[in-house]
Image: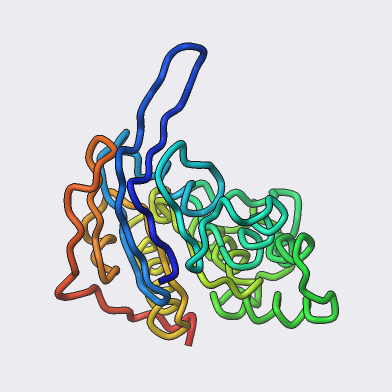
Amino acid sequence: MLIRLENLQKTYFTGEVETPVLHDIDLCIDKGEFVSIMGPSGSGKSTLLHIIGLLDDPTGGEYLLYDKHIGKYTKKQLAGIRNENMGFVFQSFNLLKRTSVYDNVKLPLMYSHIKETEWKTRIDTAIESVGLAHRAHHHPNSLSGGERQRVAIARALVTGPDIIFADEPTGNLDSKTGKMIMDILYDLNTKGGHTVILITHEHDTARYAQRIVQLLDGVVKKDTKVTKRNTSNSKLSK
């Protein structure tokens, strides 16, 4: 099992005020799965993604990653897993505006243990996989929203991660461009074998996944298999 959560809880503390966000979450995700996490604003879905992605810590329960409790990893080991085994794609792209596409994609490699002699090949391959080889030396400000998100996906891919986290990746895009981004994520799962964990509030987007986990008030209300997934027409990752 790649990811296993048992009775996971998250509470934020501000002075003496406690704000419970997640309550007794039980969730398992296998390697190679595509899982959508849905819920209204404030349901805890982004908090859950941040905990699974090692960007935040739970305050209770168990989180096993690669069949090992995260508490048994050192902080250095967790940072290494986050950098090399996980890739992140966010709604706001989070690109360095004054840095080229090539250098934005290179960034995770600079904090990895991957040999520098491999960097150029990895960067070129990642950029080509999202159809932006012709834009490699442009800056993000000269790109469309869809192109910026494709750069973010290339950056997430460059270390060869097991897991790709996508937090509302189509939220700032029109429907046509959003479909293009989802086609790429679909291909990365079905053809590349990457585990994809998607946060979305859009039902059509969620149906690219094999499973839809629905959160409400910090509790898993439903965990259902998708009987008919959206199909990919993308040529970008072929």
> Where, by quadrant of the figure, is residue 43 drawn?
top left
Relative placement, left or right, of 128 versus 145 is: right
Residue, far right: 117
Give the vertical position of 221 relative to 20 (above or below).
Answer: below
Q: Residue at x 25, y 39 (%)?
A: 40
Residue 63 against residue 158 in the figure, above or below: above
Write the residue at 31% across / 57% down. 27
Q: Quadrant of the N terminus?
A: bottom left
* Residue at far top of view: 16
Q: How many marks?
A: 0
In the depicted view, which residue is nearer to us: 221 or 135?
221
51 horizontally vs 154: left or right: left
Q: Position of residue 110 (x, y in %)?
A: 79, 62
Residue visible at 43% across and 85% down in the picture: 191
Check the image and report above or below for 116 versus 96. Answer: below
In the rendering, at what x and y percent does residue 117 appear?
85, 80
In the image, what residue occupies the spot 33% across and 63% down? 28
Q: Is residue 169 left or right of residue 214?
A: right
Q: Residue 65: where, in percent of width, then height? A: 49, 62
What is the residue that sits farthest to the left in this orientation? Answer: 227
Task: Measuring from the top left, give residue 33's x and y in whole percent.
Answer: 36, 73
Closer to the camera in the image, 3 or 172: 3
Closer to us: 197 or 137:
197
The scheme the figure's colours follow is: rainbow
